[in-house]
Amino acid sequence: MKKTILLLLGILCLFVHNAKADHMMGADIKYECLGKEKYKFTFKVYRDCTGIALPGIWGNITCKTNTASFTPTKKGVRDITPTCAGSFSSCKSNPTVGIGVEEHTFELIVDFSKAPYSNWRKNGCCEFKIGWGQCCRNIDITTMAYSNFYADAMVNLCNIDKTKKKCND
């Protein structure tokens, strides 16, 4: 009986498929001033299609010791894989074969004149950092050690207040 169980386990191990969590390839965060202290943040996230799916992103807005979490709205996803004639993207076919890169776009509107951010400003907060991260950085990226992925942007509202335009992109 013991040999039969070991044999079955051995056969099952032949069909094990490794899950790849190293899907995060890169990101870009830009912001656009919509009016006094109101900003639209656009997050572009680049995912390796041979890794796990990207369900969404979430992160934090921080200033000094203050923190507020956010979940931006997903606006779209597109396959940006550079392919030649006769080749294919793994984003559109078999996700375990070949190469493929998706660009996911998310947006977040933040009004810094409203609570809790207005309260933070009254207490001397100027530098607002908008950041998010996920597991796991793509293993094919060799410019640093394999680790989690993180991206952020910073807006210094006190410096913007000193300008004539009162807006910054």
Image (cartoon, helix red, strand yellow):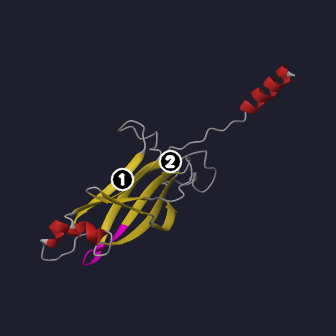
In reply to whether residue 40 is colored magenta, the answer given is yes
Extreme-bottom residue of the structure: 35
For disc 2, the marked residue is 23
Q: Quadrant of the N terminus?
A: top right
Task: Judge whether residue 58 can be spotted in this image.
Answer: yes
The x and y percentages for residue 113 are 28, 75
Amino acid at circle 2: His
> What stretch of residues is rendered in magenta?
33-41
Horizontal relation, residue 31 to residue 162: left or right: right
> How far apart are labels 2 and 1 at the CA level?
15 Å
- Whichever of labels 2 and 1 marks the residue nearer the N terminus, that label is 2
Q: Residues within 10 Å of mark 1 (few under 14, many from 20)?
A: some
Q: Which SS class for mark 1? A: strand
Q: Position of residue 116 (x, y in %)?
A: 33, 69
Q: Nearer the viewer, mark 2 or mark 1?
A: 1
**Residue 159 belongs to the span the image colors magenta:** no
Residue at the right extreme? 1
Closer-to-camera residue (4/49): 4
Question: What residue appears at the point 42 percent right and 37 percent down from the top-left corner?
Answer: 146
Please report the residue visible at 35 percent of the width from the left and 67 percent of the height from the top. 41
Tell me if 32 is positioned left or right of 106 in this view: left
29 relative to 95, above or below: below
Classify residue 169 as left or right of residue 17.
left
Q: For the C terminus, which image quadrant?
A: bottom left
**Residue 151: mark:** 1
- Answer with the quarter of the image where residue 2 lies: top right
Looking at numbered disc 1 in the image, what kind of residue is underneath it?
Ala
- Taking the view exactly as shown, the residue that stands out farthest to the top is 3
Placement of 29 over or under 2, stated as above or below: below
Query: Toward which corner of the image does residue 20 lie, by quadrant?
Result: top right
Horizontal and vertical percent for residue 88? Answer: 58, 53
| Of 32 and 111, the residue lying toward us | 111
